[in-house]
Image: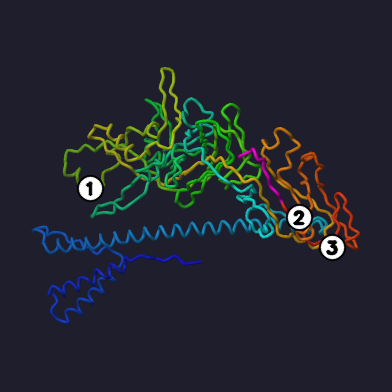
Amino acid sequence: MANLKNNSQLLYQQAVAQFDKAKTAFENGSIKTDTSLIKSVFQSFQDFFVSMGQPLMQLRLAPIDGPPWSDDYNNMMDELQSDLQIMFQEADILSKALYADFNYNQVQHSILDNQFTQIADKLKDLELLTTNAASNGRITFHRNDFVNQDKIDFDRIVGSPAHIENGAVTLQQKSATNVAEDAQVAIVIGNKTYDQFIIGSDSNGFPGNTHEVTVSPGSSLTEADYTYAFVGQKNSHANYGAVLDGNANTWFEYELVNIRDIDKQKVAKNLGFDYQVSGNQTLSWAKDPADGVLRLHMQVVLPEAKQINKVNVNLYTPPNYGAKPAIIRDVLISDGQNAPKSVLSASKKDEDTTFIFTPQNAKVISILFEQPAKYYTDIGHIYYEQKMQVEDGTAYVFDSLTKKTDAAEQPRINGPVIGLQDLGVNVKISDASVDANYPLRGSDQDQIAMDDVIYNLTRTINNENIDVGVERFEGWRYCIGVRDIEIWSCEYEQSAEIVSEPYYFDKPLEKITLSVDEDIPAPFYADDPSQKYKWIKYFVSIDDGSTWHPITPLERQPFVSGGEPAPPKIYTVQQVSKSSQATASDGYLESEYPVYSLRIRILFQRPEEESA
C-alpha cells in the first residue's frame, strides 16, 4: 500500500521568505561587508526557527504620541504580502493534495470492500464446512452466492458468459435506457396529523442542509473571534429535483438536526427553533425522529407507463466523521392503475443500491429510505437581540468591541424565521385550514442558497435597535443524501451460460441435489405455465465437464418443461467395474471410479419476442 505524501510547502516557503530578506538587503546595498552578510544570514536562521509555522508579519503599532513610521508600515505590508502569497500557494497545494488523497481513499475503499466481500464469501464456505463436520461428512454442501467470479470457469464457457452483479446472474445487457430523464419527482409525506404539515409516517424530516455550519477564525487583529458560515450558504441541496439530473456533482439532502436541551433553554431562550408555516403556525426543526429513524419517501412519476427492470440509486454521504449512507428500505412500482408492489428480493441487504427485477409496466416508482445513524456536527442558530440602550456612546462602542456586554442587557427576542416555502415546500392556505406538501419537480429546478434565504429574512427587520446574529451549538444531524435515481429499461442478449470451477469432496459422492434462488419473468410463461422453467436449465457433471446431466432444483414445482418430463431432482451416483456396464437410468449416474468432484453448468435463455 502506497504512503500518502505530505505536500505542504509552508515551512519551505517561510524559510525562503526569511532568506530573501538577507538577499534583498545585500542586493540593494544595505549590507556592505561579508561580516554583515553572515550576520544577516544567521539572523534569518534564527527568525525562521523562532517563528516556524507562524505569520511572517510582525505587528508594529503606531506611537501613541506621534505619527506612524513609514518604514514600519511598508515592512508590515511586505510581510503581509509574503504571508498572503504563502497562504494562497499552500491552499492550492493542500487542495490538490486533498483531491489526490480523496481519490486514493476511494480506490482503497473499493479494494477493502472487495476484500470484505471475498472474506464474507469464504466465511459462508466455512459455515458450510462446519455443517458438513456436524453431519460426520454424510451431507456436504457447496455454495455460490455470485458476489464475485472466483468460482466461475470462463475457459469452459462455450457461448456468451452470463452477467454477474451484486449477487445476481442475468443475461448480458444489450442496451439500456434511463426512462427517468423526463420524469418528475416528489416527496410523499404519508400519514400525518393536522399540525405536523410535512412530518408524516413516510417522510419525517426537512429538505436541505440548512442548519450545519463551519467555524473559521475571524478577521479581528485584537482578539480571537470566530465567524460561522452555513454549509449550505451557496447551495443548501434542498432541491429534490436534482436526483433526476444525472449529474454526480449535484445531490439532494434530507435532514433532522438537534442540540442539547440545556443550550436551547439557557442560551437561546427556546427562541428561533421553528420553521414558519403560515401566520402563527410553526413547525419545530430541532428534534430527533420519534423512533430514532429518519425516513424519506421519494416518488418518481414517468410521463407515461413504460416497462422497466432495473432501479439504481447513487447515494451521497456527508464528509463528516460518523456519517453513514442511507438504507434503501423498499422499492415499490405501480402502473398508475393498480396498487404499488415491492420488487425487492428476500435476500436484499442494507447496502444494496442497485435492484434488478422482473420487467414491470411502471408509471410511478416509490423509493423508501431510512437513516438510523446520526453524526455530531456544529449546528447554526439565527438569533435576535434587543440592542442595549446607553447614554454614554463611548462606553457602548467599547463594550461592543470587546464583547463585554452582559446578556441580560441585550435580551433575546422573537424575530422572523425561515418559512417552509423557502425550502421548496408548497403551502396552501384556505379559510378553514393550512396544508403543506411537496410539488412534483423536474431536474431543471434552481438550487436554494441559504445566503439568499437569510438575506430575505433580515430584510424584513426595519428596527435599528435589533441585532441579528448566528451562533454555534454542538449538535447532531441525521442525513439522507441522494445523488441520482436512475430508472432503467434494459434489453438483454438472447442466451448466456456459466460453468463452475470443480467443487471437491473428501468422500466419494453418493447423491447430488441442487438448491437455487431464481426469478423468471412472469411474461415468459404467462400464456403457458408449463413453459416457466425452460428458460433456465441446470446441469451437473461428474467427469470434469465431458458429460452434462440435466438436473431440476429442489425448489421447482413438478411442471413439465415444453411437454418433456422434468429432469430428476436427485441423482444417485453408482460405481461400476467397467464403462460397458453403465446403463442409462433416470436419476442414476454411473462411473468406473469414485467421484470426488462436481461441476455445475447453467444455461439462460429468453423468448425472442420479449425485449426486456
Dot 2: what SS?
A: loop
Task: Give the percent coordinates (x, y) of residue 266.
Answer: 38, 40
The C terminus lies in quadrant:
top right
50, above or below 292, in the image: below
Q: Which mark is residue 594?
A: 3
Position of residue 552 in the picture relative to residue 66 (left or right): right
Position of residue 539 in the picture relative to residue 442 (left or right): right
178, above or below 65, in the image: above
Q: Quadrant of residue 222?
A: bottom left
> Who is closer to the viewer here, 559 or 139?
559
Sequence order check, earlier mark of 2 and 3: 2
Dot 1: what SS?
A: helix
Marks 2 and 3, how far apart in space?
A: 18 Å
Mark 3: which amino acid? Pro
80, above or below 457, in the image: below
Residue at image mark 2: 141
Dot 3: what SS?
A: loop
Q: Main secondary structure of the magenta part?
A: loop
Q: What's the magenta region? A: 602-612
Q: Quadrant of residue 26?
A: bottom left
Task: Give the percent coordinates (x, y) of residue 143.
Answer: 71, 54
Tell me if residue 485 can be seen.
yes
Tell me if residue 255 can be seen.
no
As drawn, which residue projects farthest toward the front? 608
431, above or below 240, in the image: above
Answer whether labels 3 and 1 touch (C-beta < 8 Å): no
Marks 2 and 1, how far apart in space?
A: 77 Å
How has the structure been colored for display? rainbow
Sequence order check, earlier mark of 3 and 1: 1
As drawn, which residue projects farthest toward the left? 66
Sequence order check, earlier mark of 2 and 1: 2
Mark 2: which amino acid? Phe
